Amino acid sequence: MRNRANVGSADALVRWILAAAFFVAAIVWNHIPLVALLAALIALVMAGTALTRVCPIYRLLGVSTCKLDETKGPKGPGQP
């Protein structure tokens, strides 16, 4: 079963920005291991959902920030 995207373009951009900010926070607070680990985990989740355009929490809540033409997910080679 193919996952349908539920994260729109603007939402994905915000997630990339947040991922970068949390990665920086993880580096800055590296001397506090728990804070650095939490920041890195949040950054990985943000980057992962931005990359795949699928958010499990959105799916549970029935939310989608995609436009109608974005719901099919990333296009592969040879797809119109």
Image: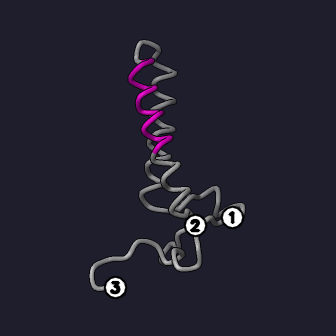
Quick one: label 2, few (<14), some, or many (20+) residues within 10 Å?
A: many
- Say which residue label 2 marks: 6
Residue drawn at (38%, 23%) of the image = 27
Residue 50 image label: none
Q: Is residue 36 left or right of residue 11?
A: left
Percent x, y for residue 54?
52, 62
Does residue 53 sit above or below 17 in this rendering? Answer: below
- Amino acid type of disc 3? Gln
- Give the colour scheme shown: one colour
Residue 63 image label: 1
Percent x, y for residue 51?
42, 57
Considering only order in the chain, which callout, 3 or 1, is on the residue closer to the N terminus? 1
- 62 vs 70, nearest the viewer: 70
Percent x, y for residue 32?
47, 14
Residue drawn at (51%, 22%) of the image = 35
Does residue 17 sit above or below 26 in this rendering? Answer: below
Q: Is residue 23 magenta?
A: yes
Quadrant hosting residue 80: bottom left
Considering only order in the chain, which callout, 1 or 2, is on the residue closer to the N terminus? 2
- Amino acid type of disc 1? Val
Quick one: label 3, few (<14), some, or many (20+) residues within 10 Å?
A: few
Quick one: label 1, few (<14), some, or many (20+) residues within 10 Å?
A: few
Quadrant hosting residue 30: top left
Regarding mark 1 in the picture, which secondary structure is present there? loop
- 44 vs 71, nearest the viewer: 71
The answer to whether the residues at label 2 and label 1 have Cβ atoms under 8 Å apart is: yes
Residue 79 image label: 3
Distance from disc 1 to disc 3, alpha carbons, whole Å, reads 26 Å
Considering only order in the chain, which callout, 3 or 2, is on the residue closer to the N terminus? 2
Regarding mark 2 in the picture, which secondary structure is present there? loop
